[in-house]
Image (cartoon, grey):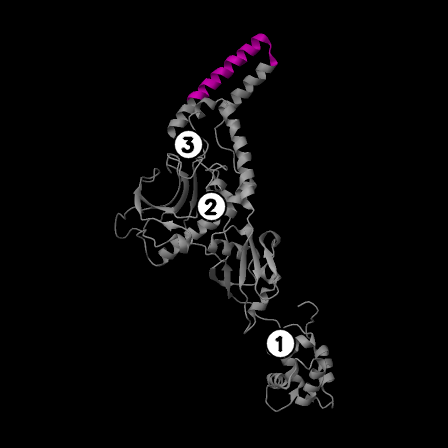
Amino acid sequence: MAGFKDPTADTLLDIFHKFDADHSGTLDPAELANVLQTLDPAVWTDARIKHLFGALDKNGDEAIQIDEFINWAFESFEAPEFREHLGLKKPKVLWKNFEMTIVYGSEKKVLKEVHPAHAAQALFERIAIEFMLSPSEIMLVIGDGTHRQMSYGAIGDQHLSDFGFVDYCYPDVSIPQLQVQRKPKLDEAIHQLGKAREQQDQNLREMWFAPVLENYRFRCSQLEEPGFECKIKLIHKVPPEKKSPTDEPVQITDYPIMVFYVEDFERPTTLYGKYVFSLSDDFPGTKNGVPTFWSKSVNCSGALENPDLKSAVEEERAKARHQAEEMSTKAEETKDSEMRSQAESLRKSAMEQIHLKKLTKAEREVIQDVVSPFVMRVWKKVAEYKDRGRTDGRFISNPRGDGFEIGPPHDVSPDPRDELKRWANTIGGLPLADELRIFKALHLLSVDAKE
């Protein structure tokens, strides 16, 4: 409250004595009315003064004692308009959880357990999860008549208390709605990052293993390109049966997993073929926003992991080493230092493993912004079913209410690590623009792909 001051004993005594015209040490209704109607007669009508007097006269003796006035100033939340006229700050309040209504277009949702101590960033991320948005594209307008705005890029490390959310902890306060406005800006960032990566990928075409890559694509060009369809699966693993009734049940630690992939999640046909997000352990809830462990640890795998391609690469590796040896021998014979350098470079290169370039910080941030809120929304649905004791994999979902649809369960191949049985749900029904953006952010889809 800018311009307002904390009440102190000396300040309150000065105020009290200004009202106490007869210096009796108490205030009667006439003394209170005389000062207030001089300040603003339009506001301080007889009815309002009577109501105010009743709020301050706690013992009902038709007089306001000094201790009643001081207790009101330090502790009471009543008569806020009187406090405002006196230029006094509100009394300190115990911070607590409260609910806020969030409005985005025609949709309304209620966020529970909002707290002034929470990071402001977490509020944006919670809203992103609820409406399947990207946090960085959200602008919040506080519906308290002030039209104050909050943007994700400007909040930094601030907490909700820094934006006046402590006021919503006071009793009988009217908590305003938050109006969500979306400011699209990520598509261009995704496009630029994708173009840069595609340019880097071309360098692989110039390496010693280039002949092997001639029959492979880096990524698909359409969401539904025949033979290169972009898909999402939720995969579960069945724990092994107990050998005896007294055995402890075996815990499956890394499942369920959510897989974004091209055509075949086990043997992708493109070099950028698969991303895996683990939904293991207990659902962390949304109070703290979107966890960062996915974007920090996620990496792409694909056709480079396929046995047939690995075998072909090893054949090319042997050829490259042989070529390096021949070049080195010839360089020694001809005293050609440039050829000697080329031979050494080829020899070292042929010793290294082939892998896609690691994701940059900017690429991980885009995945955090675009993909992780959607993953959290699916995980929330999975957690709700788990809490109800449902393990049959038959989720009730629909694109209109959830923003996606989880299909019926079906068997998939066993886990190749331990041959334990697995089953899966196909996830679909996303708005086309959202699906395009997700697969482009993961580099599984060409950035030039259209709806």
Disc nearest the viewer among 3 and 2: 2
Q: Which region shows up in magenta? A: 315-337
The vertical placement of 79 against 28, above or below, is: above
Q: CA distance from mark 3 to mark 2?
A: 27 Å
Disc nearest the viewer among 3 and 1: 1
Label 3 Cα crowd, 10 Å radius (few <14 / some 14-19 / many 20+): many
Q: Amino acid at mark 1?
A: Pro
- Across and down, in percent, residue 364 comes to 53, 42
Seen from the viewer's position, the closer of residues 168 and 430 is: 430
Seen from the viewer's position, the closer of residues 215 and 187 is: 187
* Disc 3 target residue: 303
Q: Amino acid at mark 3?
A: Ala
Rendered residue at 52%/20% (across/down): 347
Residue 204: in magenta span: no
The vertical placement of 38 against 116, above or below, is: below
- Across and down, in percent, residue 29 comes to 66, 89
- Across and down, in percent, residue 127 comes to 50, 56
Q: Quadrant of the C terminus?
A: top left
Indicate the secondary structure of the residue bearing disc 3. helix
* Disc 2 target residue: 433
Q: Quadrant of the N terminus?
A: bottom right
Residue 333: in magenta span: yes
Q: Earlier in the sequence, mark 3 or mark 1?
A: 1
